[in-house]
């Protein structure tokens, strides 16, 4: 039996565990997965019929022979969504096996370790893409440095904040596009990520790379590429562009998510209440009970600094009798009564109030190993044409995220980032 | 002819018992107006101003009407729970002109303050809801009052810098939890010693 076949057997043993490893309660993708709908779809577009505008004409009537006028009907339209595929490639070299004195055990350990690490990384990648606005842009170049860098580093980019360098990871392949997302300047590998200083270093500087260029994830091609429809795609008050194949200009009110401008100031109770009330006014009070406040750790901390809430102290307080207090309270940290879900990947200047019962995923392929005729592990070839001392396997998944009611949420943007972050 | 008229309760109101309020005043202290820093309010009794364009819908979600007005409505949801509020000083809301700039909405040429007038004397804000672990109703019993007082006293003792540290600790714990769960899952799928039977050896 070849070694790759043995690894394949180990991978098969963990295959049914993949969905469990894929989920994690603190990431947006899983929240949508757990609370929203999942629709199984083919390669054709999934259609979401929307009742966009009310119909009928009400008014005073003259029943003494008056003209009762004409009527009108409800306006319906159809949003459409089609899945896109993501892959995560994992290579294992022969050398890692020699870390143990037992060949069989080494293969088991290698398979387990790589599956765990790769799944954590793949999930983190998808969660990062979920923070974007549907075009795969992970960041915008603020400044470029090409001198005084370590050997092998072609350039250092200071990334504009938000999101800074938060959506990148080490060894990721990225592509540089011009600011209009028309010209793909080329690709590079990330050699260093420093989210605290908003820096990334890359091994190549594609020709023409300039300040204000944007960096997208690997695999995207052509002008105006399409990636996962994330928070910034569904939660916006833009009145131009398209949303799930609908022209925003056609329904400028109905497709716009209510917004509160933070004006580069720190978050206040007033701004939070404004954002929540916008949902109450448009959809009714009961809708608010379904909201969650999705935000970055920075804004969560800022909210705590206001000193309004004490539940987090009960929940998170170290030692003492914190657990006793937990027994009585839900322990949920809230923002004006709305549960807070924070993420390290969320935009540092926003608080998004989401009603995830209106969100869902159109899924064509659940997370799984890439499989060709039952084979999940593939050999790597060396430059000579002979086998390389390594093999490769892939995780793949195909889905897209939809939201059937953009007005069911609201958001605060342009909030100041607290010092120390 | 038979009359079918009936009374429908639209909003239930309650006041917190004076004894509870007094205990919270002692536990949480008073602001510079002499009012309690913490208080307990019933959701259906605690009202606030909300101004702007209201879209009213029927039970099926169909739009009935749209109006531009300021309404006095329950501030917190759910309305059938006790909520604990904390007093916030006026400066928490920025300057009056900032308040106006941020909260003013113009609808059909009508300018309206979405949150009502500036809270010049400060305002009470939602701190937490008295509910069980699943969010269910909890009565404002003496035991619950004890818990609230302890929570308030706990809160007073915590320096704010520790709150930021608590977030970092939580994130690290999440990572550890996931790693442990992942290891458990994978060990379950691929057991130790390649699935071969083994016995423990007394040491």
Image (cartoon, grey):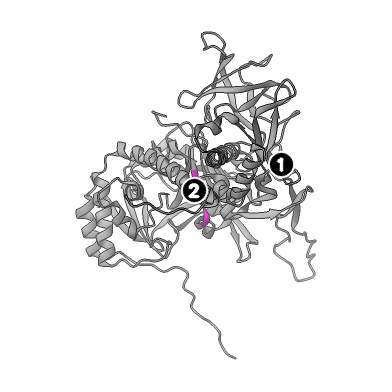
**A5, A161: nearer the viewer:** A5
- Helix, strand or loop for the magenta stretch, by majority: strand
Residue plotted at (27% across, 39% down): B159
| Residue B137 among magenta residues | no
Disc nearest the viewer among 2 and 1 = 2
Q: Which residues are magenta?
A: A290-294
Residue A391 point in image, percent of width and height:
65, 33
Residue plotted at (65% across, 62% down): B62
Residue at image mark 2: B192
For the N terminus of chain B, the quadrant is bottom right
Residue A176 placement, left or right of B104:
right
Residue B51 placement, left or right of A77:
left
- Specify whether disc 2 shares its chain with disc 1: no
Number of marks in picture = 2
Taking the image as drawn, is residue B149 in sight?
A: yes
Using the image, determine if residue B163 lies above or below residue A40.
above
Pointer 2 local density, CA inside 10 Å: few below 14, some 14–19, many at least 20: some
What is the CA distance from the residue labelled 2 to the residue labelled 1?
38 Å
Using the image, determine if residue A17 lies above or below residue A136.
below
Residue at image mark 1: A84
Taking the image as drawn, is residue A409 in sight?
A: no
Residue A352 point in image, percent of width and height:
53, 43
**A232, B95: nearer the viewer:** A232
Using the image, determine if residue B52 lies above or below residue B57.
above
């Amino acid at each position: 039996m070849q070694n790759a076949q043995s690894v394949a057997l180990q991978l098969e043993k963990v295959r049914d565990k993949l969905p469990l490893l894929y989920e994690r309660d603190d990431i947006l993708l899983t929240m949508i997965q757990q609370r929203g709908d999942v629709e199984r779809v083919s390669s054709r577009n999934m259609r979401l019929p929307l009742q966009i505008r009310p119909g009928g004409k009400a008014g005073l009537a003259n029943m003494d022979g008056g003209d009762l006028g004409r009527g009108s009907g409800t306006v319906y339209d159809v949003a459409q969504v089609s899945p896109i595929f993501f892959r995560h490639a994992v290579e294992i070299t022969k050398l890692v096996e020699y870390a143990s004195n037992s060949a069989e055990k080494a293969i088991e350990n290698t398979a387990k370790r790589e599956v765990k690490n790769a799944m954590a990384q793949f999930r983190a990648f998808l969660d990062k893409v979920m923070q974007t606005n549907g075009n795969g842009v992970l960041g915008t170049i603020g400044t470029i440095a090409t001198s005084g860098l370590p050997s092998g580093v072609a350039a250092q980019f200071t990334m504009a904040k938000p999101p800074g360098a938060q959506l990148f990871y080490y060894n990721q392949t990225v592509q540089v596009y011009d600011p209009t997302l028309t010209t793909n300047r080329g690709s590079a590998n990330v050699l260093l990520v420093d989210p605290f200083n908003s820096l990334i270093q890359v091994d190549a500087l594609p020709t023409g790379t300039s300040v204000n260029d944007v960096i997208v994830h690997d695999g995207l091609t052509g002008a105006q590429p399409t990636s996962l429809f994330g928070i910034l795609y569904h939660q916006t008050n833009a009145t131009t562009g398209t949303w799930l194949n609908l022209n925003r200009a056609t329904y400028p009110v109905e497709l716009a998510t209510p917004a509160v401008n933070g004006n580069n100031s720190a978050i206040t109770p007033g701004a939070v209440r404004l954002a929540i009330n916008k949902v109450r006014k448009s959809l009714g009070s009961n809708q608010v009970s379904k909201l969650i406040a999705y935000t970055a750790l920075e804004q969560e901390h800022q909210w705590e600094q206001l000193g309004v809430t004490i539940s987090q102290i009960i929940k998170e307080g170290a030692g003492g009798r914190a657990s006793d207090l937990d027994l009585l309270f839900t322990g949920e940290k809230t923002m004006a009564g709305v549960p807070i879900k924070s993420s390290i990947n969320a935009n540092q200047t926003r608080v998004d109030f989401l009603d995830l019962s209106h969100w869902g995923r159109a899924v064509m392929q659940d997370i799984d190993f890439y499989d060709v005729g039952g084979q999940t592990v593939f050999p790597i070839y060396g430059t000579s044409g002979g086998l390389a001392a390594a093999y490769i396997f892939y995780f793949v998944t195909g889905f897209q995220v939809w939201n059937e009611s953009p007005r069911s949420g609201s958001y605060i943007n342009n909030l100041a980032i607290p010092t120390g972050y | 002819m038979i009359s079918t008229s009936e009374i429908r309760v639209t909003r239930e109101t309650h006041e917190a018992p004076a004894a509870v309020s007094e205990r919270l005043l002692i536990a949480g202290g008073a602001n510079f107006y002499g009012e309690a820093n913490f208080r307990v309010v019933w959701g259906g009794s605690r009202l606030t101003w909300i101004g702007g364009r209201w879209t009213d819908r029927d039970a099926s979600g169909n739009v009935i009407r749209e109006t531009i007005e300021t309404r006095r409505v329950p501030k917190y949801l759910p309305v059938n729970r006790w909520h604990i509020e904390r007093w916030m000083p006026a400066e928490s809301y920025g300057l009056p002109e900032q308040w106006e700039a941020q909260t003013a909405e113009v609808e059909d040429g009508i300018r309206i303050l979405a949150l009502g007038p500036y809270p010049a004397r400060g305002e009470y804000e939602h701190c937490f809801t008295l509910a069980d672990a699943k969010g269910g109703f909890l009565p404002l019993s003496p035991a619950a009052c004890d818990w609230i007082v302890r929570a308030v006293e706990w809160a007073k003792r915590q320096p704010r810098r520790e709150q930021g540290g608590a977030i970092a600790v939580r994130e690290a714990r999440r990572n550890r939890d996931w790693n442990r769960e992942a290891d458990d899952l994978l060990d379950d799928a691929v057991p130790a010693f390649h699935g071969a039977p083994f016995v423990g050896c007394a040491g």
